[in-house]
Amino acid sequence: MIRGVWSRDTIAWVIAASLLPTVAALLLPQGPPAAARIAIGIAVILGWQLVFRIASGVPMSPTAVLGAVAVAVLAPGDLAVWQLILALTFGTVIGELIFGGWGRNFLNGAVVTLAFLFVSFPQVAQSPAGSWIALASLPAAAMLLATGILSWRVLGSSVAALAVTIIVLGAETPSMATMGGVAFGFVYLVGDPVSSPSTQAGRVLYGALCGALTALLGQGYGAIGAPQAVVFATLLASIFAPLIDHGVIAFRTALKRRRHG
């Protein structure tokens, strides 16, 4: 990331701006239903941000857009409004705001929201995001890579590990139409600069873990591009992200001691 011009809010606004192609890819084919879901998501998340702003001074963030769009992309099933509100509330409060807001959390709020949805309401049919979402993720990835917000180590290792695991499993190569959710998830969930490791080697290991888990879990859900696969892969890897950083730092420290011992 280019230093000197970036702040927490600047990064959040760039992430929100990069979502414009994805929003267009949602609204053009789906129209009002997608717009309503995004609007509900933004309203709920901003509402809780305002509550925590008033109660404890937690700063508000435009990443509310990311949470709303992530739900619209990866949870397109026939959800009732109360189910959507409940999941968004849980993910926003438990996954983000109780830690002091975006930038201080160790789990991505959108990931926690989606995981809550998939666990609590498994009866709601889910379907992989389409090819337009995959295509819309390309300019977003380019923008975030160019600004350094998205780590090329995380993205590259996750894609490579996904491809290698698919080959090892002997699974059918997924098509663009079924990989929209994975493409979106790799860019915005796996590549979240807050919940991913901070060491360079840690980012490679973390991305590889996400990619491999996405393929393995996808097999269990019947499709590599299943939205549940990338969500739970990211959740599991994010939990271990601090441990990955700790391991990398400990390894480097041991090497330095051996060299100078």
Image (cartoon, rainbow, N blue to C red):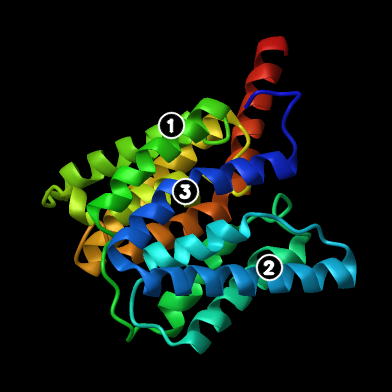
Image quadrant assignment for residue 129: bottom left
On screen, residue 48 above or below 101: below
Q: Secondary structure at mark 1?
A: helix
| Amino acid type, mark 3 | Leu
| Amino acid type, mark 2 | Leu
Labelled disc at residue 142: 1
Tags 2 and 1 in contact by the CB under 8 Å rule? no
Disc with the residue nearer the chain's start (3 vs 2) = 3
Residue ID for mark 3: 20
| Amino acid type, mark 1 | Ala
On screen, residue 172 above or below 154: below
On screen, residue 45 above or below 138: below
Q: Nearer the viewer, mark 3 or mark 2?
A: 3
Determine the CA span between mark 2 and mark 1: 28 Å
Residue 70: x percent and y percent?
46, 61
Q: Nearer the viewer, mark 3 or mark 1?
A: 3
In front of the other: 200 or 258: 200
In front of the other: 65 or 2: 65
Please tell me how crowded label 2 is: few (under 14), some (14-19), or many (20+) other residues with Cα within 10 Å: some
On screen, residue 251 above or below 119: above
Residue 177: x percent and y percent?
19, 54
Residue 230: x percent and y percent?
38, 57
Disc with the residue nearer the chain's start (2 vs 1) = 2
Please tell me how crowded label 1 is: few (under 14), some (14-19), or many (20+) other residues with Cα within 10 Å: some
* Apparent side of residue 155 relative to residue 7 in the rendered image (left or right): left
Residue ID for mark 2: 46
* Quadrant of image for the N terminus: top right
* Apparent side of residue 65 relative to residue 253 in the rendered image (left or right): left
Determine the CA span between mark 3 and mark 2: 19 Å
* Quadrant of image for the C terminus: top right
Image point (57%, 58%), residue name: 65
> Can residue 200 be seen here?
yes
